[in-house]
Amino acid sequence: MPDNICDEHTFNEIFRLHARELHDFLYYKFGVDNNPKDLVQEAFMKLWDNCHKILPEKARAFLFTVANRQMLNDLSRKKTAMTYASKEPVQSHSGETPEYLLQEKEYMEKLKTAIESLTEEQRTAFLLNRIEGKRHQEIAEMLGISRKAVEKRIYTALKKIQERVGKI
Amino acid sequence: MKPDRYIEKWLNGTLNDEERREFEKTETYKELKELSDSIQKFKAPTFDTESELLRFSDRIKGKGKVVRMNWQKILLRVAAMLTIVVGSYIYYMYYLPATIETTAAQKKRIFLPDSSEVILNAVSKIKFNENRWNRDRRLVLDGEAYFKVRKGSIFSVETSTGTVRVLGTEFNVKQRKEFFEVVCFEGLVQVTTSLIDNKLPALHSIRILNGEVIQGQFKDTASPSWIGNESEFNSVPFSQVIQEFERQYNTSIVSESVDMDALFTGRFTHEDMILALESITIPHHITYQITEDQQILLSGESE
């Protein structure tokens, strides 16, 4: 086991291992308009600049620490926007009337606004849990907070969304 | 179990089979299930790891390996350099002894920090530490010098043959090759060599020549004759006289059939070479000749 990650092969392996998760994390945190892919590049650049003092097993923690601290410039920051995959009409089931489709679209828009209105912390924890299926403990490690705090965030987020969306 | 507790457990995926069956019957679950399914559509877009890695590699190559100059490192380097520069400066200024030298046909008068006076004869060298004079009152002498020490001042003169320690006095030290002579004009000096450890009172001299110790006395004289631009000798081997002549006139003397061990008593001036040459050659019946390139040839009368 090398004692740093400056070696190209080692570094590439670390990139393959963590880049996607880091991207998802940043996406849920900042939304689609704040270039999560570029933020991933930046985080890895920081890792590379410090490669000589980081053990391979510490790389993941370093990356997520950087991601958690990544502050977007207030001026260039875009509103956190989420996006969803809309169903294409051709794929719609026979029973789905135009009325139903319209209703569904309305619902999705409501849901989108609800998610966007969550705080950064609530949204990150909630979506990592709901969409990526991450356990509370895993999320706690990614965010660098306690499992209890993660639980609270997810639960609060759920309640808020339910409130805003209401019943279908 | 409260409904909220079910939700919490469901969120964390920690409901056991029985609990799940129970929970799945509830209206709350149906709502949650629907909500959760809809949320799936907000999944992050696919991330092409390989192409992102390629992009990253290109960025690094364009940038080169960044060895970020840590400001602390820079500061440390600057500090180290400053230390060396300032340190050397202090060393040169305070710790390195001053060296004063004379060349052939030159005399120099210098004053020590305690206002003692030193007169340096031709081709001599004296070393002392001006800035540490109060702690380190040592002089290193190579050649000949006359010391007029301020009353009450103590210091020592080190030569290759021995050390002369003084207490407010006037004395002359001569250290030339095999020749070592201390002449005390006033007060008392302590002469220490491998052969002797003597106290030398005023108007006494001590000489070591080829390992032989010769003590002498002389009549009242204020200072050595060389101070008055004359070299005086009292039963000194002729070779020493010639060497002194070379030093005072910056010439070289080649001699032929001249008895170099013959003892010479007399003096020569530093101001007139021909007169000086006659002063040393006539008593020993030596003839001299000055060549075109200012070399002096001496020849004895053996033939």
Image (cartoon, grey):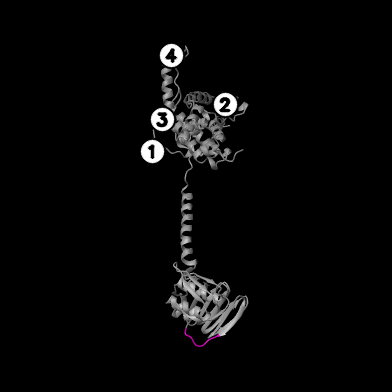
| Tag 2 residue | B23
Which secondary structure lies at badge 3? helix
Residue closer to the observer: B277 or B241 = B277
The rendered magenta stretch, by its main secondary structure, is classed as loop
| Tag 1 residue | A74
Q: Earlier in the sequence, mark 4 or mark 1?
A: 1
Q: CA distance from mark 2 to mark 4?
A: 31 Å
* Residue B284 coordinates in the image, percent (x, y): 53, 79
Count residues near mark 1 (Cα–Cα under 10 Å), then give few for <14, some for 14-19, many for 20+. Answer: few
| Segment colored magenta | B217-222
Up-down: is A107 above or below B75?
above
Q: Earlier in the sequence, mark 3 or mark 4?
A: 3
| Tag 4 residue | A97
Task: State which chain disc 4 sits on.
Answer: A
| Tag 3 residue | A33
Q: Hey, what amino acid is under mark 2?
A: Phe
